[in-house]
Amino acid sequence: MSENSLQNVNYRLTKHWLINFWINEHDVSHPAGFNPLLIMDVFEHAFMIDYGLKRADYIEAFFKNIDWKAVETRLK
């Protein structure tokens, strides 16, 4: 996982591909033709206030709070 990026799990309906993308800037590198299923922001601004330098704790909390039914609806 890139240290400062948006982590994306994307799905391409026409090819039935599931793929991860690392996006290093908020405004560029978004994949065309893919639907985002789940996005995790791991830029410092996303976790510093609540977690300080404990990025791993932020990631653990993120995964504990995923609504997998909502993610599944994005596949359809």
Image (cartoon, rainbow, N blue to C red):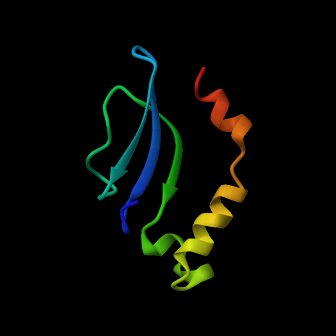
Residue beneath the point at 41% across and 14% down: 14
Along the horizontal axis of the image, is 2 left or right of 65? left
- Residue 4, given in percent of the width and then of the height, sits at 36, 67
Q: Position of residue 23 (x, y in %)?
A: 33, 52
Query: Residue 28, percent across and down?
Result: 26, 49
Q: Residue at x 29, y 58 (%)?
A: 25
Residue 73 percent coordinates (x, y): 66, 28
Q: Quadrant of residue 49?
A: bottom right
Q: Quarter of the image containing the C terminus? A: top right
Q: Residue furthest left?
A: 28
Q: Residue furthest bottom?
A: 52
Q: In the rendered picture of this protein, how many numbered marks are placed on residues?
A: 0
Between 71 and 60, the residue placed more toward the observer is 60
Q: Residue at x 37, y 45 (%)?
A: 21
Q: Quadrant of residue 1?
A: bottom left
Q: Residue at x 62, y 74 (%)?
A: 57
9 is higher (above) or lower (below) than 53? above
* 1 or 39: nearer the viewer: 1
